[in-house]
Amino acid sequence: MRLERLLLSAGVAMLLAGCVTTTTTNESGLSNKIPRATKAEQKEEGARIHTELAQQYMQNGDLQDAMVKVNKALQFNPNYVPAHTVAAVLYERINDQANAELHYRRAVALAPEKGDTNNNLGWFLCNSEGKTVEAMPYFQKAVADPFYQTPARAWTNAGTCLSRSRDLAGAEVDFRKAIEIDPQSGEALYQLANVLYLQNDAFRARAFIQRFDALGQPSAAALKLGHDIESRLGNKDAALNYGRRLQSQFPDSEQARALDATASQ
């Protein structure tokens, strides 16, 4: 899932902006002003802590307790965007797509200009039947955020959506934009190689699958694509090498079984 990772701090920080103070007297008779959080800040901190706990439970596979914690976070602050994002992911995990969409949309409504919230909703819609077209404007909003730290991810997601819709030329444009931003984006490199191969441009596809391979993060899909590209170009030795690596590293994969089936024909 290509969503934005929530980076919630491990410590409990005191929020100082807009806080009130209390006054105490030390042993020397001098007064000390001690910041005390306002009710709004306490609610914000409670939401943050419970969202962090929900995320930890979810990472450990305890979805039930994660749901309890994220609901508690939203009780503290119904407008806390990270809590809505964690809730959306949780609902996806339990296959409740309606509530997942509700929370993704709520996050965007609360932070309409933020790149991560728009990318998350766009990716959710991209994976929802019949909503691919609706997803595209959210990716555009994501990359328009000047403070968005991972625009390459949104461009890659947009390209993947277009590819699924068989708009291969449009997908190629978006994958290239992703690679311009992040030349080491393995997902964008693989997807661009695949789109070029589907457009019968095996020569250019080879360049990008080789760049992906150079990252040292092989996948069954990429090795199969490398095999198919070299086969189309007539390079039997290179195709055989990809095939051997696929069968050796991912023997139980769908791609390895497909290669075996083709070889036995």
Image: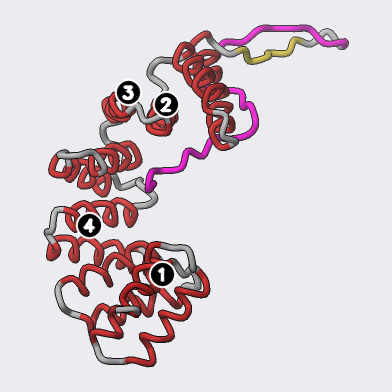
Name which residue type carries label 1: Ala
- Indicate yes or no whether the magenta region holds residue 11: yes
Q: Residue at x 21, y 51 (%)?
A: 161
Residue that mark 4 sits on? 159
Name which residue type carries label 4: Gly
Q: Residues within 10 Å of mark 2 (few under 14, many from 20)?
A: many
Residue 3 to residue 261: above or below: above
Of marks 1 and 3, which one's residue comes earlier in the chain? Answer: 3
Q: Is most of the magenta stretch helix, strand or loop? A: loop
**Residue bounds of the magenta highlight:** 1-27
Residue that mark 2 sits on? 87
Of marks 4 and 2, which one's residue comes earlier in the chain? Answer: 2
Q: Looking at this view, is 133 or 21 the one in front? A: 133
Secondary structure at badge 3 equals helix
**Closer to the observer: label 1 or label 2?**
1
Of marks 4 and 1, which one's residue comes earlier in the chain? Answer: 4
Q: Residue at x 28, y 28 (%)?
A: 101
Query: Which numbered tag is attached to residue 99?
Result: 3
Secondary structure at badge 4 equals helix
